[in-house]
Amino acid sequence: MHSNYNNYIMHNKLSKLSKLSFPKTGYLFAIAGVFLYSFSDAIMKYFIPIYGVNQITFLRTICRFLPLLCFSAYAKINPLKTSRVGENILRSVLASIGTYAFLLAYKHSAMVDVIVIGYTTSIFVIPMSVLLLHEKLHRRDALAIAIGFAGVLLAFRPGYGIFQSGIMFAVIGAIIAAMNQVIIKRLSSTDSEVTIIFYHHISLILMSLFFGGGEFIAMDEVDLAYIAVGGIIGTIAQYCMVHAFKLSTSSNVASATYFMLIPATILDFFVYGKIPDMYIVAGLILILTGIIHCAKAKAADPRVPSRTP
């Protein structure tokens, strides 16, 4: 009798754990990813005016690439092995173009402004995911995205010049990022996180060498150390985001990306001395409302959502 009771308790614990193991855990991975991305992007934004987009892209990618090589060798896996080579190459090229677009946007605009525009990715992802991946959009995710996007629009400050070069680069990056996220979701059903990231890094290294290899200049050791740290942080962030797509739907992950405006605003204040205005503060409140609503809805959901194949 006592043994049956223990088995019952263990079954309940495993059942509760399984409920947390897919979409809810994916949401947490997405928040961790965008949080780390904000720090990585802040470091890159600081050094782009000094060394240029191509050199920063090359060094950052090398610093991301080396840990992947070491991990692949340690785990004895071939990161290039995939049955979907063409799709990985397409994604890597798109992702590289999107990376360049955002880095150019950071060069010409404030970090918070670029991130605000980048949030429109979530809006583009939703119809693409429904049409191409046949995902179902739950009301809680739609409401969280709507509230968050309302916060983005408010933080974007009505009347702001959208036709600035930095903002236009950010818009291009957001559209490409949406296409990229849909492809990641498709690839995540068959390929590992390492493989998906590996192809992207190869593309970025080749692209940065092709466009700016002859323009690289000598770099201070301290600056190189900062860029190396930013690259490693970016690798962890990228892994978290790809893993989030494995565990959850695209629309679910999209609602978590609004979180990035919070650390970005803090970094803009402490690193660049930019004080948030009333629109940014009001937008942050709305974004936090959307995040909290989504988190509470997931915690209260008694169903166990299945992983998207």
Image (spheres, helix red, strand yellow):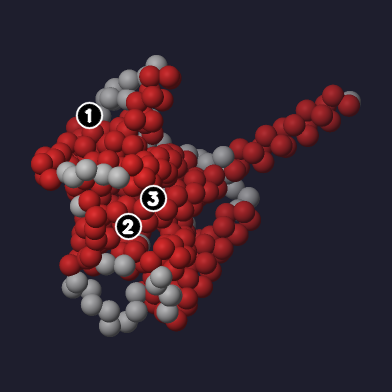
Q: In the image, is residue 266 above or below residue 3?
A: below
Q: Quadrant of residue 69?
A: top left
Where is residue 63? Give x, y as percent. Answer: 33, 37
Indicate which disc, 1 or 3, sits on the residue closer to the N terminus.
3
Residue placed under numbered mark 1 in the picture: 85
For label 1, the SS is helix
Where is residue 57? Give x, y as percent. Answer: 25, 45
Indicate which disc, 3 or 2, sits on the residue closer to the N terminus.
3
Measured Cα–Cα span from mark 1 to mark 3: 28 Å
Where is residue 76? Give x, y as percent. Answer: 39, 16
Question: For the residue marked with disc 3, what is the amino acid?
Answer: Ser
Indicate which disc, 1 or 2, sits on the residue closer to the N terminus.
2
Residue placed under numbered mark 3 in the picture: 40
Residue placed under numbered mark 2 in the picture: 46
Query: Is 73 positioned to the left or the right of 180 in the image?
Result: right
Question: For the residue marked with disc 1, what is the amino acid?
Answer: Val
Query: Is 229 positioned to the left or the right of 178 in the image?
Result: right
Q: Nearer the viewer, mark 3 or mark 2?
A: 2
Q: Nearer the viewer, mark 1 or mark 2?
A: 2
For the residue pair 287 and 167, the one nearer the viewer reads as 167
Q: Residue furthest right?
A: 1
Q: Residues within 10 Å of mark 1 (few under 14, many from 20)?
A: few
Mark yes or no: residue 130 visible: no
